[in-house]
Amino acid sequence: ETVKLLLSFEANVNHFDRKGISVVGVAAGRGFLNIVDLLFRNHANLIHTDHDGLVPMCIAALQGHVHIVRYLCQNGVECVHVYDNHGRTPIYAASQRGNLAVVQELYHNGADITIPDDIGRTPVCVAAFYNQIETLRFLCGLPECNVNHCDHHNRTALHSAASKGHDQIIEILCQHGANVHIRDHYGRTPLFIASEFHHHQCIELLCKYGASIDELDKNGCTPLCFAALSG
């Protein structure tokens, strides 16, 4: 009611703060659908970007407000492929946070899960890095999913999972065809990474799926060398 009252006195519906966040961006981030709807009906700009390049849809996606995302999509707000300042789309943001319902809503509204960010990471890569198990499971089940996509360092989602010790993520990726032999720019496979950080369950899984125990990186080191170097 307060928002409605202020609007009746012709408050600036498109005002934004020092960070560039608009009134509708604030409401979207808090999940206040009634306010988003009211602002929209009063001609608020639903594609305004803040200083980080975030539109209201991306803010809602980050916070897991699927009802806001659905409303924006239903009202023709074409933001599913809008990039922030780091090349991240709303479905990327939702995948990073593990907001599965938002990921599904965006996907069913045409979001592309193959679009990488500025350093080449896709939603699959970022879901693997942040251990978003159910989100990754959903993404891996999609026909366009590429579990072997490489970022700008030639690292895959499997490298990310191995670095963090996410054994369940490794299992899901391998079940969906992840290649344990892909090398990064240093010639290191996921087994090197898992060995460096002493992630035992990850090592066992990678070996189970065919990783070579004595493979060499560009410096002639083996995974065993890495384990010994890191103590």
Image (spheres, helix red, strand yellow):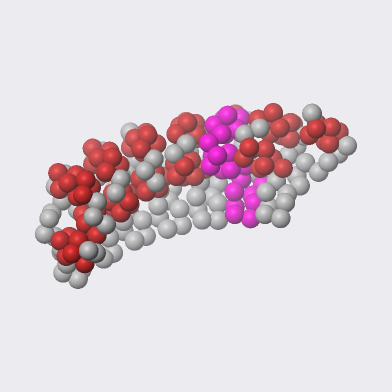
Residue 221 part of the magenta segment: no
Drawn side of residue 62 relative to residue 11, left or right? left
- Extreme bottom residue here? 219
Q: Position of residue 215 (x, y in %)?
A: 14, 60
Residue 27 lies, with reference to residue 204, above or below; the image says: above
Quadrant containing the C terminus is bottom left
Left-right relation of 25 to 163? right
Q: Could you tell me what secondary structure mostly forms the magenta stretch? A: helix
State the residue at coordinates (75%, 44%).
14
Q: Quadrant of residue 60?
A: top right
Residue 107 place in picture, x, y as percent: 46, 34
Which span of residues is magenta-colored?
48-73
* Residue at screen point 49% across, 44% down: 93
Residue 88 spot, x, y in % from top left: 50, 50
For the N terminus, give its image quadrant.
top right
Q: Quadrant of residue 201?
A: top left
x and y percentages locating residue 154 in the rendered image: 31, 58
Residue at 50%, 34% (x, y): give it: 102
Q: Residue furthest left?
A: 214
Is residue 116 visible from the viewing direction of this image? yes
The image shows residue 80, relative to residue 1, as above or below, that is: below
- Within the image, what quadrant is residue 123 found in? top left
Q: Is residue 58 within the magenta segment?
A: yes
